[in-house]
Amino acid sequence: MQRYSITQALCLPEYKIIGILSDSDQEMHLQIRPYKRKKAKCSGCGEYHYGQKIHSFKEVIVEDLRLFRKRVFLHVIKRRYRCVKDGRLYVEAVDWLKPRCRVTNRLAKEIYRLTSIATNQEAGWYLGMNDEKIYRIDKSCLKRD
Ligand SMILES: [Zn+2]
């Protein structure tokens, strides 16, 4: 699979695919990180701390919408900074990902639409996830903000 076509299909313009960790008939694992020019928003205070040095990195694994009929798992590298307001360390906030969610917002939205016409069990069968996971996604990631 061409990296260029995956980048196009993924449609996360501020992120760069830095590795295709695995790619089988069923699923694809992609490692991505923000472009250096992307400003990091502090998840502590919600502001941009310009000129702050990166303290460290944190990787989270989340599931995203299917691509090329495969399940997609993103290994997202987040930057960690010290907040100038309270001096604590925070990872950057990601617009398309809620904290502690195991799926991207756009997959959460699709699950939400699916569970409004089907049971969690049926939705789980369709998505290849167990219904407990669907239930947890429904509870934690679909609260409107
Ligand atoms: Zn801050």
Image (cartoon, grey):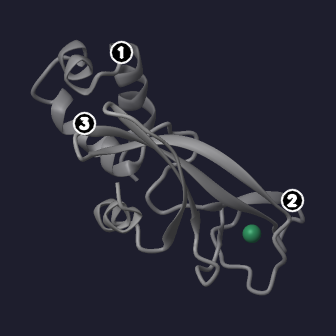
Question: Looking at numbered disc 2 in the image, what kind of residue is underneath it?
Answer: Arg
Q: Residues within 10 Å of mark 2 (few under 14, many from 20)?
A: few
Q: For this view, does 118 lie left or right of residue 88?
A: left
Give the CA distance from mark 2 to mark 1. 37 Å
Element type where label 3 sits in the image: helix
* Picture coordinates of residue 108, whole percent (x, y): 33, 41
| Between discs 3 and 1, the one toward the N terminus | 3
Query: Disc 3 and disc 1: Cα gap in Å?
Result: 15 Å
Which residue matches tag 3?
Answer: 112
If the image is split into quadrants, where does the N terminus sit?
A: bottom left
The mark that comes first in sequence, 2 or 3, is 2
- The residue under label 1 is 130
Q: Nearer the viewer, residue 21 or 40?
A: 21
- Is the CB–ligand 1 distance for label 1 below 8 Å? no
Q: Nearer the viewer, residue 29 or 43?
A: 29
Question: Which quadrant of the structure image shows residue 122?
Answer: top left
Give the residue type at disc 1. Asn
Give the quarter the ligand 1 occupies.
bottom right
Residue shown at the point (58%, 40%) measured from the top left: 100
Instruction: Determine which residue is flagged by label 2.
Output: 88
